[in-house]
């Protein structure tokens, strides 16, 4: 069964360091999402791509976060510099075009970031 | 402001003890309500989509229902493997961005 791949699964870093997360969506899924989930809360959308274009990045802290999906396939989310408040699970999800209103997002297992 | 509230925060059940989880929402022009299951340390897994009041969806021991103000996830005769956090979400009124609740953490004991 096709899955959304994410790496690394776990990352521990010190504040002010740079971190990067990678996501490979399910083949054929043009829409890709990055969510941040703080422990005990629901996921919050950081950025949404349609192919290689950003559709929504209104909640992305652009002074320190960046995201790219250069060829419209896999994607990288970067944080520089990391702050203590960035400790969270970073979830990647993908979906087929036009399924946003069905809720049928396929999530990866996430990347757990701990900032010391 | 678009908002999703889930209750209770946590629920402990004995195996076989049926119960319900609540998801209340405030959003203009509901365009769908979605339920997900999330196991510890994993990403959410899509369960159901509900579109209109009165609609019901079922999957194994789970049944989701929708009214004009809230949705319920009914769990009938739960088993320990049903233990997980259950999240609900709705699209915002003027955006496709999903607004998630904080989830209900369900624990089912044998």
Image (tube, helix red, strand yellow):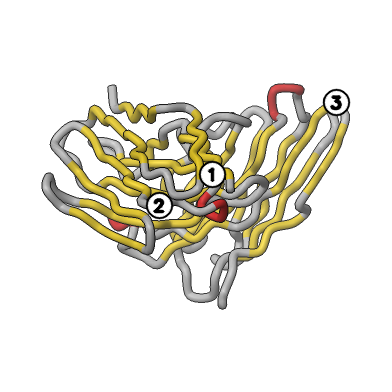
The kind of secondary structure element at disc 2 is loop
- Residue A103 point in image, percent of width and height: 35, 54
| Residue beneath the point at 62% across and 31% down | A39
- Residue B72 point in image, percent of width and height: 28, 40
Residue closest to the eye, A1 or B70: B70
The kind of secondary structure element at disc 3 is loop
According to the picture, the residue beneath numbered tag 1 turns out to be B108
Distance (Cα) linking label 2 and label 3 = 43 Å
- Residue A4 point in image, percent of width and height: 60, 64
Q: Is residue A103 visible?
A: no
| Residue beneath the point at 58% across and 48% down | B110
The chain letter under disc 1 is: B
According to the picture, the residue beneath numbered tag 2 turns out to be B77
Quarter where residue B73 is shown = top left
According to the picture, the residue beneath numbered tag 3 turns out to be A116
Distance (Cα) linking label 3 and label 1 = 34 Å
Q: Are marks 2 and 3 on the same chain?
A: no
Residue closest to the eye, A65 or B26: B26
| Residue beneath the point at 66% across and 64% down | A5
- Residue B89 point in image, percent of width and height: 36, 41
Q: Is residue B81 left or right of residue B34?
A: right
């Amino acid at each position: 069964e096709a899955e959304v791949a994410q790496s690394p699964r776990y990352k521990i870093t010190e504040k002010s360091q740079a971190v990067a997360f990678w996501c490979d969506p399910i083949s054929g899924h043009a829409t890709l999402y990055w969510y941040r989930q703080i422990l005990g809360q629901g996921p919050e959308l950081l950025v949404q791509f349609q192919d290689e274009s950003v559709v929504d990045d209104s909640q992305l802290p652009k002074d320190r976060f960046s995201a790219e999906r250069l060829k419209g396939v896999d994607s990288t989310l970067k944080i520089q510099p990391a702050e203590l408040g960035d400790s969270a699970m970073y979830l990647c999800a993908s979906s087929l075009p036009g399924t946003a209103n069905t809720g049928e997002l396929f999530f990866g297992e996430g990347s757990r970031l701990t900032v010391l | 402001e678009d908002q999703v509230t889930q209750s209770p925060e946590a629920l402990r059940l004995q195996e076989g003890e049926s119960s319900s989880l609540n998801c209340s929402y405030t959003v203009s022009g509901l365009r769908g309500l979605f339920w997900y299951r999330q196991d510890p340390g994993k990403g959410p897994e899509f369960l159901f989509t509900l579109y209109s009041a009165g609609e019901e969806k079922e999957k194994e021991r789970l049944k989701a229902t929708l009214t004009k103000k809230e949705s319920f996830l009914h769990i009938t005769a739960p088993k320990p493997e049903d233990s997980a956090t259950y999240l609900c979400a709705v699209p915002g009124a003027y955006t496709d961005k999903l607004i998630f609740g904080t989830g209900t953490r369900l624990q089912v004991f044998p």
